[in-house]
Amino acid sequence: MTGEQQHTTSCKKATRIWKARTTRFLHRHPNYCQACDAYGIQWYHDYEGILTDGDCPTCQGKDLCPRCMTPTMVEKRNTFYTTQEVFYDTCTTCGYRNDDDYGDQYTMPRKPECYCDRERA
């Protein structure tokens, strides 16, 4: 053994998929907000120590699209909800919507966690 960690087949597959999705995302959105990885929000601990989220000061806090960093975010009414008025922001340049699920097509893909050391122990 050379001291290099041996990964399982599932770990190698997850890493290959992550690399492919990351390459695709970077090709489509080279100017994404690197402060929040195009999520538009950042997590922090408030004054009581509770984990909460807020607008990313680099993009959403300046009304910039987190995916393409252009000032083209427009507020629109979400007609899906009938009991209350719900608004979302959408980018007229790249189509980013801040009410969509956070999939790899909208945000920088997260690197998969590796538990190979634990699985072999």
Image (cartoon, helix red, strand yellow):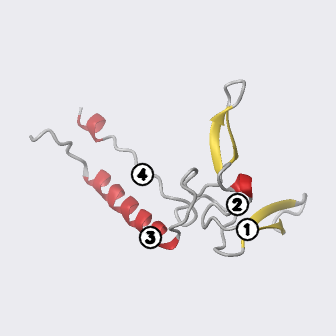
Pointers 3 and 2 in contact (C-beta within 8 Å): no
Label 4's element? loop
Q: Which residue is drawn at 33% across and 40% down?
A: 115
- Type of residue at label 3? Arg
Label 1's element? strand
Residue 60 percent coordinates (x, y):
70, 55
Residue 50 percent coordinates (x, y):
68, 29
Separation of marks 3 and 1 at Cα, in angstroms: 21 Å
Lower sequence index among marks 1 and 2: 1
Separation of marks 3 and 2 at Cα, in angstroms: 20 Å
Which residue is label 4 attached to?
111
- Type of residue at label 2? Asn
Relative to 39, is 24 on the left or the right? left
| 65 is higher (above) or lower (below) than 44 | below
Pointers 4 and 1 in contact (C-beta within 8 Å): no
Residue 63 found in image quarter: bottom right
Lower sequence index among marks 3 and 2: 3
Lower sequence index among marks 4 and 1: 1
- Type of residue at label 1? Thr
Separation of marks 4 and 3 at Cα, in angstroms: 14 Å
Instruction: Kindly identify which numbered label has been placed on residue 90.
Output: 1
Front in this rendered view, residue 9 or 61: 61
Pointers 4 and 3 in contact (C-beta within 8 Å): no
Pointers 1 and 2 in contact (C-beta within 8 Å): yes
Which residue is label 2 attached to?
98
Residue 119 found in image quarter: top left
Q: Residues within 10 Å of mark 1 (few under 14, many from 20)?
A: some
Q: Residues within 10 Å of mark 3 (few under 14, many from 20)?
A: some
Front in this rendered view, residue 97 or 12: 97
